[in-house]
Amino acid sequence: MGRALLWLSRDDTFSRRTLEPDEIAGELEKFREAAGTAVQEIERTADEVGNRLGPEYAAIFHAHALFLKDRTFLGPIERRISNDAVNAEWAVASVTESLAARFRDLPDENLVHRAADLEDVSKTLRRHLGDGGISPSRIETIEGEGIVLIADELTPSDAVRIPRERIVGFVTERGGRTSHVAILARSFGIPAVVAVPRLLASIGEGDRVIVDGLEGVVWREPTGDLVSLFEDRKSRDADRQRSLRERSLSGAVKTLDGQDIAIRANIELSSEIPDVLEYGADGVGLFRSEFLYLSSSDAEFPDEATQAEIYRDALARLAPHPVVIRTWDLGGKKGSRQLPGFEEGNPVLGLRGIRLCFKRPAMFRTQIRALLRAAKAGDLRILVPMISGIEEMRRVRTLIDECRDELRGEGVEVPERIVLGTMIEVPAAAIMADLLAAEVDFLSLGTNDLIQYTLAVDRANETVSELFRPHHPAVLRLIARVAEAARAAEKPVSVCGEMAGDPIFFMLLLGLGIREFSMGPRSVPALKEVARTVSTADAQRVARAALTLATADEVAALLSREGHSLLSGELTVRPREVT
């Protein structure tokens, strides 16, 4: 519960906001800083393009940088901010539109093309105006209450930079239940609702808002009775969560028929390690290392020494539990805006995960060396994302061997054996799971992307969210295939996607042969409780029945019926996609 703070983050979305007189100087300063940062980004891009393609291509970007140094462009924007008392994003958009229209009216075709260049520069500039997140001056305008962030869309890097000490919830107009930002919200324990139609037209700055992340409902200007109702519910839920946390710390988890279950945590940053310990997770099943970069205020990757210290600290604090660190999983819709020179028309099927690492070998080698430097501090397991073939894993293994030899030559002590695993998130990898299992030490099912690629449904696209169905028969058959391949190879297999944190799907995955799960730290206590209330025999019976069904609706009906019967009070309400 809190007051609404509006934030527009996309390049193509902006609105006019009237500034108070004492805000104008700060807005001008914000604009000048953004222009300077945008120039640095464009010049870095020019250097990279020049090295790869030659100086004639780099000249395009050098010309873009000149716009951001030209007073005939910057001056009108500053005057628009000062004279009209409007926000910088609006000023940039309106001045750009006016200047671009003039270019298009000129008879010289070369100058007409400058309109497109100007619009490209404007997008870069507006992006940097939003990159800094919510400014302290705007937060301070909302006194005495928590803040509910109302946004068109949030990227992962936006989400990790949110000042969580004041933000008590957020609501977005775009996105899906398994979009990266929704996953981060659950990990942070922040109530969130995504994909709300006409959100920005319905809620104004400063409106009092209730965000019910469990039911997927947003209340604007609630009555006093409604506020009291939610305060009571919030108190009861806190009591229940406290009880579950205490039980979660009580020891190993076994099913009703005595099967050992490992329930680990997914984290983005080392600052979440206290949550891993507080909520009783059996180590970390997925450390999303790319957030070391995405959460940074600059555009540089952490150097080898910095990374090694972060990894070493995480391993030592969580020892003897395992820590699975995933190598850089950038590209796609995660971080592509911060990787100059790699913008793509269809990024989800493009240069992401291990593909991007191979294209940037120095970046990847630095991370591998840092991981090896830290390895002796605890139980390190390296996980490689976006694998689609055997040759990729062999290439990674070769790189690890090379880095180990380099470090030993430098006098660094590195373990002889490094535990290496592959993510199964591409259908090709699931189909070849038996061959991959022979190459690696463990498999990790990334069900979010596996579902996305199997069903050809963009997981962050609210217009097709109803087609993103984890219980689709094709998805279940692929998971069963992977579990069987791991069992035959006597290799561990875990699930680190969002399916692991849902009680019904947890039961289904248990029946399919999964014994290791990883989820947001705050979901661990409830899922431990679920594990204690179900037997593997019952779960296997449900899974066998599900694999015989022909449609997702039939599977959903089966899971609902069996879930209510077997999970009783631990079956929580599933969040709705759109309200």
Image (cartoon, grey):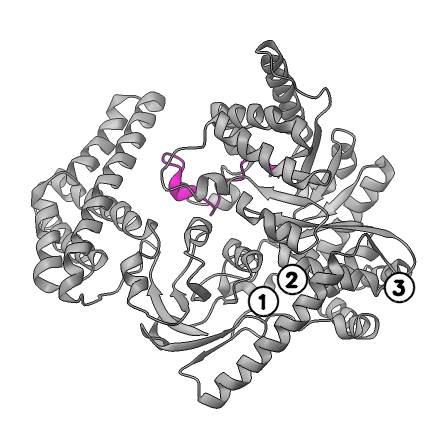
| Location of residue 367 (image quadrant) | top right
Quote the CA–CA distance across marks 2 and 1: 7 Å
Give the mark, 1 or 3, whose residue is nearer the N terminus.
1
Judging from the image, what secondary structure is the residue with disc 1 in? helix
Say which of 377 and 55 sits in front.
Answer: 377
Q: Secondary structure at mark 2?
A: loop
Query: Is the residue marked by circle 1 packed among few (<14), some (14-19), or many (20+) residues within 10 Å?
Result: few
Read off the magenta span: 326-343
Residue at horizontal 52%, vertical 67%?
191
Which residue is tagged 1?
Answer: 466
> Relative to 478, is 145 above or below?
below
Give, as a three-letter code, the residue at label 3. Answer: Asp
The Cα atoms of the two marked residues, 3 and 2, are separated by 23 Å
Crowd tier of the residue under label 2, counting other residues whose Cα lies within 10 Å: few below 14, some 14–19, many 20 or above? some
Q: What's the residue at 80%, 64% (across, down)?
A: 549
Q: Is residue 342 magenta?
A: yes
> Marks 1 and 3: which is nearer the front?
3
Q: Name the residue beneath numbered marker 2.
A: 469
Task: Evaluate whether residue 471 shows in this view.
Answer: no
Residue plotted at (61% across, 20% down):
399
- The count of marks equals 3
Tell me if label 3 and label 2 are in contact, CB under 8 Å: no
In the image, residue 13 sits, relative to residue 204, either above or below, namely above
- How much space separates mark 1 and mark 3, taking CA atoms? 29 Å
Closer mark to the observer between disc 3 and disc 2: 3
Mark linked to residue 538: 3
